[in-house]
Structure formats: structure tokens, C-alpha cells
Amino acid sequence: MQIKDESKQQKNGLILIFVINLLNAIINISRLFKEEFNFLHGIWIFIGIATIIVLIDFRKRDFSDSIPIDSILSFKHKKNIFNDPGYIILRLSSGKKRIIQILSKKQIEEFEMLFQELNIPKYDTKKEINN
């Protein structure tokens, strides 16, 4: 049994956008050598650092075409700041994580029932930090 989604295509598109964003930040920051530091330079420095952090985080995620069920160690349901159902984070045996966007509350219940049947436990971030 496997979970399939189109995350690989999304990954390639996002990485392209983030690389273009990083190049844009570098070009705008390089003007700092010709001009005096101003507020916009500060914003571009922040955008550049944030982009680097996001690109580093991408290395911790799994973007394979399918996820074998036996490679899932645990899962966690996490809500967004908006009022939507949120997403499920899967911890994989490879040490990476996979995020699955949830469209409805019914999907959450279906995933939780499936994982319960397969004896895949929920994990708690607080416990993970203490270990």
C-alpha cells in the first residue's frame, strides 16, 4: 500500500521560485556597496535569509512520488492559522518528513482511522524536543 501525490512537481516549481527570489535578493543587496544602507536593503537582507532557511528546510522533506506505508513511523495533525482543516505531517524512516494537505475534516478522520488500523502512532512535538 502506498500514498501517492504530486509533490515532486510542486517541489521543482517552488525551488525555482525560491532560487529566483534568492538571486533577486542578492542583486538588490549588492547595490548596498554603491549606495547608503536604507530600509529596502534591510528588507532584501531579511528576504534573502528567509529564502535560505526555506531552502534548507526543503532538504528535510520527502518529495518522492509515493510513500510506502511501511516507511511511515508516526504522524501528526497540525492546523493552520486559518480556519481550514490543516495538514498531516508524516515522519518517515528515512529521517525526513512529508506534509499532506488536508481538504476536509472527513479526510482527517479517514487518515487517523487508517493510521490507527496500521498501528502508526501520533507523535508530539514537545516529547520530540525533550529527547
Image: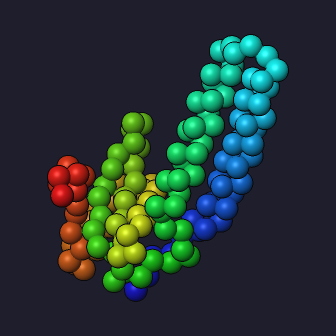
Q: Is residue 3 left or right of residue 39?
A: left
Question: Outermost residue toward the front?
Answer: 33
Tell me which residue sits at (63%, 60%) in the image.
10
Farthest residue to the right: give it.
Answer: 34
Image: 17 above or below 107: above
Q: Position of residue 112 (x, y in %)?
A: 27, 66
Q: Is residue 119 above or below residue 109?
A: below
Colouring of the image = rainbow
- Residue 83 falls left or right of residue 14: left
Query: Which residue is nearer to you in this view: 79 or 32?
Result: 32
Q: Quadrant of residue 13?
A: bottom right
Residue 34 seen in the figure: yes
* Residue pictured at 41% horizontal, 67% vertical: 96
Quarter in which the N terminus is drawn? bottom left
The C terminus: image quadrant? bottom left
Q: Residue at x 65, y 53 (%)?
A: 14
Front-most of residues 50 and 77: 50
The count of marks equals: 0
Q: Position of residue 111 (x, y in %)?
A: 32, 67
Q: Nearer the viewer, residue 76 or 115?
A: 76
Image location (x, y in percent) of residue 86: 39, 49
Q: Is residue 100 shown to the viewer in this render? A: no
Asked whether, in this view, residue 17 is left or right of residue 129, the answer is right
Q: Nearer the viewer, residue 79 or 50?
A: 50
**At 53% across and 57% down in the image, what residue appears?**
58
Tell me where residue 28 sits by quadrant: top right
